[in-house]
């Protein structure tokens, strides 16, 4: 590896993984809008490697991008109201294999999307490697807990939480959704029926991010490296993160997003992370990808002092 010229960052040494495995998944089959397939490249371009090296990651292995068919070259493979689902699941199988291998070798999987359907594969790999469902922190403007029967669009990036629950790669009582502000009627019912803890932006406004994260960590589990964080960049307000697949006004502030990641790192619970839905076509000078890198570093132990 080349030596970074960035200054060494203030970190909690125990929070920084010794090995990070970067896995790109240029998936856009789960959504109607093109561009998120370029998310992994945009995040790498935003000096991800330099940041991780400055943070003190001893071994950084970038596995490149998993091959994902583009819609134009793919036959219409779908189940009812779930567009491209067979192709998405095939890609997620390969992702699960890489994530499982990383964890079994003592690594920290850092998955770069791509639309949020990739979480199906990430969660499968984490669950297999740990022989149990991980705690899940899902930061997103959307619930992503639709099924083909409840989805208004048939887009699979709105279904990964449901699919992971059905496959028993996560369990409702250790799953927390944060930042919701655009939730379908079927999702509301499913969240209530399953008993999944969900923090809307209204509740975050009322009680504050510190209390949200304290309750979240108590729910998902406090064992070291036992929690997966899945961060959709549209969870952040589009004034801070304009380059996302499905922007919704009124999201997390810059500091709320960082505080969430800082608290997860301080608790020592995070064992894997994915960043999804970065769309450089819609971005302003790669601002969203740059913010994604900053959030990754906060999640892995960067502190202000």
Image: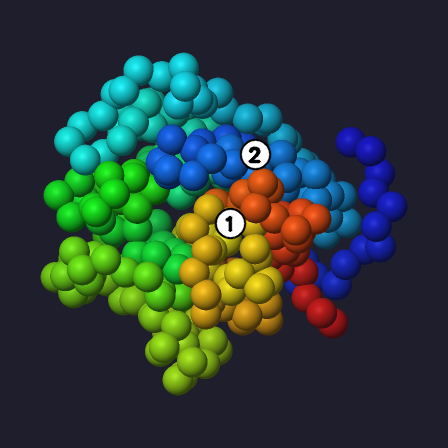
Is 251 placed left or right of 78 in the picture? Answer: right
Q: Mark 2 points at which residue?
A: 38
Total numbered badges shown on the rendered structure: 2
* Residue 225 falls left or right of residue 200: right
Q: Residue at x 71, y 69 (%)?
A: 304
Does dot 2 land on a helix, a strand or a loop?
A: helix
Query: Residue at image x 64%, y 39%?
Result: 42
Count neighbours of disc 2 (C-alpha within 10 A) and say few if under 14, some if 14 to 19, many if 20 or more: many
Residue ID at (53%, 61%): 238
The single residue placed furthest to the bottom in the displayed view is 206
- Position of residue 90 relative to residue 214, above or below, is above
User: In the rendered image, which quarter contains the C terminus?
Assistant: bottom right
Percent of width and height locating residue 85: 27, 29
Q: Give the answer, above or below, for where 49 lies relative to 285.
A: above
Q: Position of residue 226 (x, y in %)?
A: 41, 52
Q: Position of residue 217 (x, y in %)?
A: 40, 67
Asked whether, in this view, residue 9 is left or right of residue 104, the answer is right
The residue sitting at 56% across, 50% down in the picture is 243
Along the viewing direction, whichever of 247 and 111 lies nearer the viewer: 247
Mark number displayed over residue 99: none
* Res 164 quadrant in image: top left
Q: Where is residue 62 in the image (x, y as percent from the top left)?
A: 63, 30
Q: How crowded is mark 1: few (under 14 residues within 10 Å), some or many (20 or more)?
A: many
Q: Is residue 281 visible to the viewer in this orientation of the structure?
A: yes
Badge 1 marks a residue whose secondary structure is loop
| Residue identifier under label 1 | 244
């Amino acid at each position: 590896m080349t030596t970074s010229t960035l200054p060494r960052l203030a970190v909690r040494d125990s929070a920084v993984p010794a090995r990070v495995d970067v896995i790109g998944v240029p998936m856009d089959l789960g959504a109607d809008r093109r561009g998120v397939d370029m998310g992994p490249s945009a995040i790498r371009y935003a000096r991800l490697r330099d940041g991780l090296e400055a943070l003190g990651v001893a071994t950084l292995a970038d596995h490149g991008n998993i091959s994902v068919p583009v819609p134009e070259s793919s036959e219409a493979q779908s189940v009812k109201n779930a567009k491209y689902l067979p192709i998405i699941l095939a890609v997620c199988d390969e992702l699960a294999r890489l994530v499982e291998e990383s964890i079994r070798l003592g690594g920290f999987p850092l998955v770069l999307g791509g639309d949020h359907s990739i979480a199906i594969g990430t969660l499968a790999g984490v669950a297999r490697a740990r022989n149990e469902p991980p705690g899940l922190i899902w930061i997103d403007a959307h619930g992503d807990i639709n099924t083909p029967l409840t989805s208004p669009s048939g887009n699979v990036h709105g279904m990964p939480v449901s699919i992971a629950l059905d496959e028993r790669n996560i369990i409702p009582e250790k799953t927390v959704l944060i930042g919701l502000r655009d939730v379908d009627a079927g999702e509301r019912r499913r969240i209530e029926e399953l008993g999944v803890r969900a923090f809307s932006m209204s509740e975050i406004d009322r009680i504050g991010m510190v209390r949200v994260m304290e309750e979240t960590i108590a729910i998902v589990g406090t064992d070291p490296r036992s929690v997966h964080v899945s961060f959709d960049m549209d969870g952040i307000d589009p004034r801070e993160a304009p380059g996302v697949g499905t922007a919704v006004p009124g999201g997390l502030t810059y500091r709320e997003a960082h505080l969430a990641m800082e608290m997860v790192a301080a608790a020592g619970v995070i064992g894997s992370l994915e960043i999804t839905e970065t769309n450089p076509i819609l971005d302003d000078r790669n601002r969203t990808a740059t913010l994604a890198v900053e959030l990754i570093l906060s999640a892995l132990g960067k502190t202000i002092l």
